[in-house]
Image (cartoon, rainbow, N blue to C red):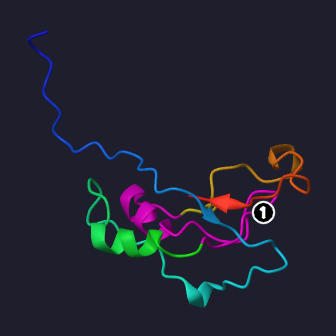
């Protein structure tokens, strides 16, 4: 046990902010120009500025959740990831799900999103 080092980096924890109602797809009218982008990271070992993160989290969700993975929008950290890796990325997805119906939300039409955190 003598070789174990103490934690040297702050552990970021998920905070439960409570749920917010999400408009139905027909009533949803938030556009890209209505929302600010995810705040940039201060460096590759730190999170974003906390005040900017709070402003970002206070917004309506955008883009609207879809049945299949969002393969239209590009990962907002594309440039940062490319700079870190030292190479180009080809169409990195905006979310973690693989594309296509195999990975789609099951029974989306019956249980589409009504709230978000």
In the foreground, 66 or 69: 66
Q: Quadrant of the C terminus?
A: bottom right
In the foreground, 86 or 12: 12
Identity of the residue drawn at 11% across and 15% down? 3
Residue 45, position in %: x, y?
Answer: 26, 53
Q: Main secondary structure of the magenta part?
A: loop
Q: In which quarter of the image is the N terminus?
A: top left
Q: Does the magenta stretch include residue 64?
A: yes
Q: Is residue 5 above or below residue 47?
A: above
Residue 114, position in %: x, y?
Answer: 74, 61
Mark yes or no: residue 49 visible. Answer: no
* Residue 23 falls in image quadrant: bottom right
Residue 93, position in %: x, y?
Answer: 64, 61
Q: In this view, does 100 lie to the left or right of 113?
A: right
Q: Which residue lies furthest to the bottom in this view?
A: 33
Image mark count: 1
Q: Which residue lies furthest to the top in this view?
A: 1
Residue designated by label 1:
66
């Amino acid at each position: 046990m003598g070789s174990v080092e103490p934690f040297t980096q702050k552990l970021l924890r998920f905070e439960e902010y409570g749920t917010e109602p999400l408009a139905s797809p027909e009533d949803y009218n938030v556009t890209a120009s209505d929302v600010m982008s995810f705040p940039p990271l201060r460096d590759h070992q730190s999170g974003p500025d906390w005040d900017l993160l709070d402003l970002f989290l206070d917004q309506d969700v955008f883009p609207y959740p879809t049945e299949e993975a969002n393969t239209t929008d590009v990962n907002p950290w594309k440039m940062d990831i490319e700079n870190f890796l030292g190479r180009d990325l080809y169409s990195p997805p905006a979310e973690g799900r693989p594309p296509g119906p195999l990975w789609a939300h099951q029974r989306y039409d019956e249980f589409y999103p009504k709230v978000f955190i």
